[in-house]
Image (cartoon, rainbow, N blue to C red):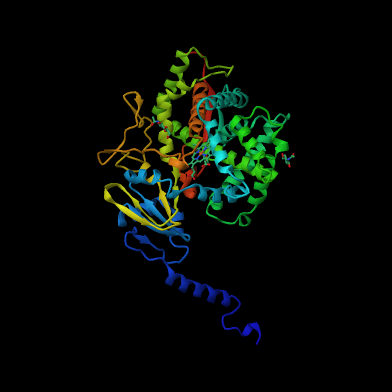
Amino acid sequence: MGPEALPLGPYGGAAAAALLLWVVCVLCRRKRKTGEPPLINGWIPYLGKALLFRKDAFKFLLDQQKKLGDIFTVHIAGRYITFIMDPFQYVYVIRNSKQLEFHEFADKMASKTFDYPALSNVKFPDLKENLHRIYQYLQGKPLEIISDHMMKNLQDIFEWKCSQATDWETEKMYKFCCSVMFEASFVTLYGRVPAADGRKVISEIRDKFIKFDASFPYLAANIPIELLGATKKVRKELIHHFLLQNMTKWLGGSKVVQARQDIFEKYELLGDYDKAAHHFAFLWASVGNTIPATFWAMYYLLRHPEALAAVRDEIDHLLQSTGQKRGPTYNIHLTREQLDNLVYLESALNESLRMCSSSMNIRISQEDFVLKLEGDQEVSLRKGDWIALYPQILHMDPEVYEDPKKYKFDRYIENGKKKTTFYKAGRKLKYFLMPFGSGISMCPGRFLAMNEMKMFLFLLLAHFDVELGENKAVRLDNSRMGLGILLPDTDIAFRYKLRSLRN
Ligand code: HEM
Ligand SMILES: *[C@@H]1O[C@H](CO)[C@@H](O)[C@H](O)[C@H]1NC(C)=O
Ligand SMILES: *[C@@H]1O[C@H](CO)[C@@H](O)[C@H](O)[C@H]1NC(C)=O
């Protein structure tokens, strides 16, 4: 009997196998046990609700909350994820770092995305702990040193790029933010590339970074890199830039990167390529969110002239009161206190972070156990289940933020001071703004990130008149929902011109 006689045709075998698998899956699909939250199983086994979730996680979660309440489990791409929607319950998840683990999941995802061997591998004892220890170089005194370097590097770039703008110059805003923030962050963390074309080398790395970053949501969704066109090749090229032979030539890098390098050198079983991949991963962490966040901060300020005026007033006032002059020398200096006291700038920045951040805080249950919550509530969780907080829901909650879709630059100010009391249903919230995650998974670069963005905006507004160059709406591109700062769905033109030095 030839193959043509097979009753199912050429793909019949596969179809029959898939059908069988489907029947088996439906039969073995998880059922809710007592004490467990309401369970939403998609009717397509395995894929579950993945498709809907990927399309618009925010809306999907709100819809489920309306139907099922503040705690429910969704079957998404083979995983059971329990969402805790009530912000008053967040603390019970964040506090429980013993039964609810984070690093194993992050390690798996990051090692695959950035192509280094998992930190948890027994070949690298204590590597994870050692790397975590040096996050201290992103705080305190070392943070002040990095911030000072960043301020200087930003001014070098503004001077080089913009000091000819005696008349209006037009550029695309995202491209501008990306180019300035990437170069300034790169030089601050990794050092200057000393060749005559050092700037060009950095811009090549930036262009590859943008290509790689475009594939990031797919990599995070576990899609094999082989299916993502040139991504694999681009990632390899990017990693090669961070080989030790290259990095040792870079001048004036940061203590945090140096300390990471010193740690890697202690692990003989970590290959040269693996070390480079780690450096690349850190670069991604340090600019991947900062660039879009800077864009949104700038975009919202330019869209709201009253906000722009208030922030600029604050900046001019600070310059005046410290006897510093904006002008052709570009050597403004800001102390930590001065940066901290820019309350209007900080409020405007936080307001844009509220609107553009969408990170899911994930924990993984280490055992079958009952998670105790406020008000004698409890939920049974199974080993391996995910627990997720989705702070974008909180950021957009009209009970917490009146008119949540509206940008109000002074939301985080009260009587001229920072406002940190926010309420829901009359009760004060412990967590009201979470762009940087929470608890054990909180971003170690958050202080630097805030400083960098403040310094960028400070210099931009101190030196230049800026305005939008076209009148179109820029919206959030939702393809990174749950993964960090959302990108804009389009770029937009803006104009800048040196401010007159009088007044
Ligand atoms: C607006 C800018 C930034 C945002 C919104 C942001 C947000 C985050 C978030 C949400 C996480 C946790 C990821 C998770 O839960 O899976 C994270 C982790 C991390 N961030 Fe940031 N970040 C920013 C800037 C930076 C900067 C400037 C640096 C470094 C200089 C940095 C370094 C890191 C590192 C190293 C981790 C991984 C921490 C770990 O090993 O657990 N980030 N960031
Ligand atoms: C350094 O970076 C270049 C790309 O600029 C790359 O081609 C090369 O392989 C890297 N390594 C060394 C040792 O130069
Ligand atoms: C702004 O956000 C940062 C980080 O989330 C926080 O530390 C700071 O207190 C906030 N400032 C105000 C005025 O809300």
The x and y percentages for residue 367 are: 43, 55
The quadrant holding residue 260 is top right
Residue occupying image coordinates x 56% and y 43% = 128
Residue 75 visible? The answer is yes
The image shows residue 96 at horizontal and vertical percentages of 40, 46
Q: Residue furthest left?
A: 426
| Quarter the N terminus occupies | bottom right
Q: Nearer the viewer, residue 305 or 447?
A: 447
In this image, 243 relative to 209: left or right? Answer: right
In-front residue for pair 1/488:
1
In this view, which residue lies farthest toward the bottom? 1
Q: Is residue 305 left or right of residue 498?
A: left
Q: Residue at x 43, y 36 (%)?
A: 352
The count of marks equals 0
Asked if residue 427 is positioned above or below residue 223 in the image, the reply reads above
Q: Nearer the viewer, residue 190 or 268?
A: 268
Instruction: Please report the residue visible at 46 percent of the width from the left and 57 percent of the height from the top.
Output: 384
